[in-house]
Structure formats: C-alpha cells, structure tokens
Image (tube, rainbow, N blue to C red):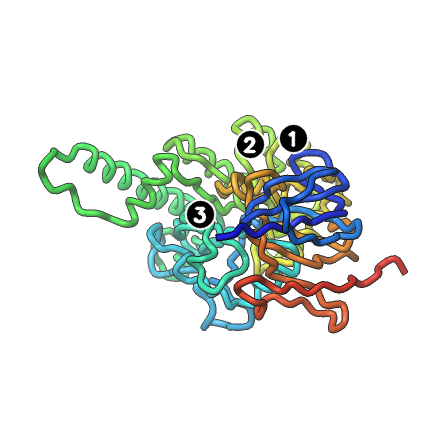
Amino acid sequence: MAMSSLAITGAHVVPIDGDPFDGTVVVTDGRITALGPAVTGPAGTEVLDAGGRWLLPGFVDAHTHLGVHEEGEGWAGSDSNERTDPVTASVRALDAINPADLGFDDALAGGITTANVNPGSGNAIGGLTVAVHTHGRIVDEMVLRSPSGLKSALGENPKRVYGDKKQTPSTRLGTAAVIRKAFVDAQNYLDRHAAAEPGKPPPSRDLTHEALGWVLQGEIPWRQHSHRADDIATAIRIADEFGYRLVIDHGTEAHLIADLLAAKRIPVLIGPLFTARSKVELRNRSLANPGKLAAAGVEISIITDHPVVPINFLVHQATLSIKEGLDRDTALRAITINPARVMGVDDRVGSIAVGKDADLVLWSGDPLDVLQRALRVFIGGTQVYSWDPISRTGRSRFADPAGGDSSWSEPPDHSR
C-alpha cells in the first residue's frame, strides 16, 4: 500500500517541547515524520500552505464527561454516575460514551483532539476512565488508552448522595473509610491470587478488586476528585498508606498546600474555572489559582469538566489564567503535554514531535487570543474539522470518514 504524506508549509509552528519556528511539519501515514524551518516531504507529498498561520498540537482535556453526560439529552443521555453503590470501581466510562454527543463537535471547534472521559463524582469510587480522540464513529476506534485511571471522590458529593439515602458514606470520615476498605479488600484479593497453588484453580475473579489492583500495582493513577484543602490532605494521606500514584482533580484549594503537593510531585488538574461559587467547596475558586500552583512548582493541567464548562472554552480558561498571573508557556503546557502525561498518552499526543500522532490544529492566529479560531483540525493526519467562513460554521460530523474534508478557504480577518 502506498504511503500517504502531507506537508503543512509556511506555518508558525508551536511544538510545545521546543522553541516555536516558522516552517514545515511533514506527516506520513498519520505520524509526524519531520519538522523544521527547511524540511520537505517525500515525492508526491500533498502540500498545504498555512500562509503564516499558527500550527499547534491538538489540545488535551484530562477531565471531561464527553459522551457520558450528553449535551441536550437530559436524563436519557446522563450516564456519568452509577449511584447504586458507593464503590463501583468496575464500571467503565468507555461503555457509556456516545460519539454522536454534540460535545465532540464542540471539542474539535476548540482545537481539542484528545480528552479523558471520567465517570462522575457521586460515588466514593466511581469507575474507570478512558483516554480518547475526539472524533470517530464508535468509541473503540477513538481509544488511546483504556483504562487511563480510576476515579474517586472526596468531599460534598458522595456524602450528599449517600447521606440522602441514609447509608454509608454520609460523612467525610465515612467516605475515607469506604475507600480504605475497598483497597484492603483488593490487597487481600491480590494476595490470594499470588498465593494460588500451581495446578489448582485460582480464586474467582472479581472485577472491582481487579480495577483497584491496577491502581495498587501502579498500572493506572488514582484520579481523586477533591476541592477543599482538607480533602486534598486526606487524598494524600490515603495514597501514602497504600502507595499508589495520586492525581488531584479539581484542586480548588490546592494552592493552600501547594508546597506539599510540589514536594510529593503530585499533579493537579485544576478546574473548571468558569463557574459560579455554587457550593461551599468552591468558595476559593479563582482564575489566579493555576498561577499560584505553578509558581510553587506543582505540575498543572487545566480542565473543563465538560459539560460543567463547555469543552471549547478550554483554551479561554488558559488565556484568562495568564491574565491572572500564570506564565504563558506553562498555560500552553497545561492544555497539551501535561494532561497527556497524566493520562499516560504523552508518547503519542500533546506536542509536535517526530513519531507522534499527527494530531494538529491550524489556527487563524495565536490561540491564546480569544478572537482566533481553529481553522483545520487533523487527527492521525486526517482532517476531521474545518471552519467555513461563508456559513460561519464548522464542519466535522459529516466529513468523509475515509479522507476527511479537503476543502480550504480563507479564514475570517480579525484585524479590522
């Protein structure tokens, strides 16, 4: 089979890991094969002249509910929480994702090509997360890593859900106890399997204990929903007891103990940032918090928690965080390589580098300028979205599945 090759020339390339340059990125069979000021593609390469526009890797949102909490579907499209048991470690977000959710179109329009899809935060242990591309017919074709983490929640949500049912956990101490018991049960399960005698049937499988075992064995991170500083401290305490890899999701008050998080090298996925202070846990929400965390040496990613904040506003959260003190380069890393690393897919996405997936977005200008827009979006070298300046709409859902939409027209002029 002949190789397909594309050269995007005349672009202002922002590779994330490396200095920006004006030049070319070459894509062959869906992977980046060359980049630089003077590179060229092999004979027969299709050429796209970017005309000086900005080329960046597709953005990455490490905490969403895309496809499991669908846009405009009400209860019928809400599958984010299995609120029938406080421990549902075995459920998989993968099994509830609807690729036809309109949120995936919004993701492409916002330049987001990769997202982590999480179960919700109603349970103490909510289930397995999955890293996906934001375009595809069926979710199995979109998966980059499954599972990519195990979701857990501390704080108000599980104590409210199960307190209303008059069952454990109805308090913060009850939630911590539920999590500890689940890990002890999983440790015992792993020990029984390790001690199984050769030639004899092993102990029966248990999907809940298997999922928790992946966390205990370091195969996937523990994704800890926690807002308040005291809940974050509890997350650290339990992680230290059981020795697993901890990621703080939301981290509204993480800046109050930033030195501790930095010393333990615990990443924080901060957000959503465009919300009202709708509950006690959010009293200290501020667009200044990402900058405070980064200044203290904490690795941050910025998240939307879509649909809490529409996913296409991811870059705008980064922009307004810069306005409140976050370093510009750190802001771009917070929506590209940092979340890709947390999800365990940084070998494939999150920067423009030789060997990585050709997940690329051509912008009309600097994406940190709110007046600029994504003009073309490529996933694996295939164009999956384009902006039509005539109808002033984006096209993605009905693009040719074999080769994408190859049309091109001039973008709107924002200089006037």
Left or right: 99, with 52 as reference point:
left
Task: Evaluate whether residue 64 shows in this view.
Answer: yes
Q: Are marks 1 and 3 in contact (CB under 8 Å)?
A: no
x and y percentages locating residue 330 in the rendered image: 68, 38
Residue assigned mark 1: 296
User: Please, what secondary structure does the residue beneath circle 1 have?
Assistant: loop
Q: The C terminus lies in which quarter of the figure?
A: bottom right
Task: Evaluate whether residue 282 shows in this view.
Answer: no
Compared with 119, 15 (above or below) is above
Outermost residue on the front side: it is 43
Residue assigned mark 2: 261
x and y percentages locating residue 366 in the rendered image: 77, 49
Q: How many marks?
A: 3
Left or right: 377, with 182 as reference point:
right
Closest to the observer: 71 or 31? 31
Compared with 71, 171 (above or below) is above
Task: Please give the name of the residue rendered at 50% of the width and 64% of the height, measured from the top-left corner.
Answer: 69
User: Please, what secondary structure does the residue beneath circle 3 have?
Assistant: strand
Tell me the CA gap for discs 1 and 3: 30 Å
User: Please, what secondary structure does the residue beneath circle 2 have?
Assistant: helix
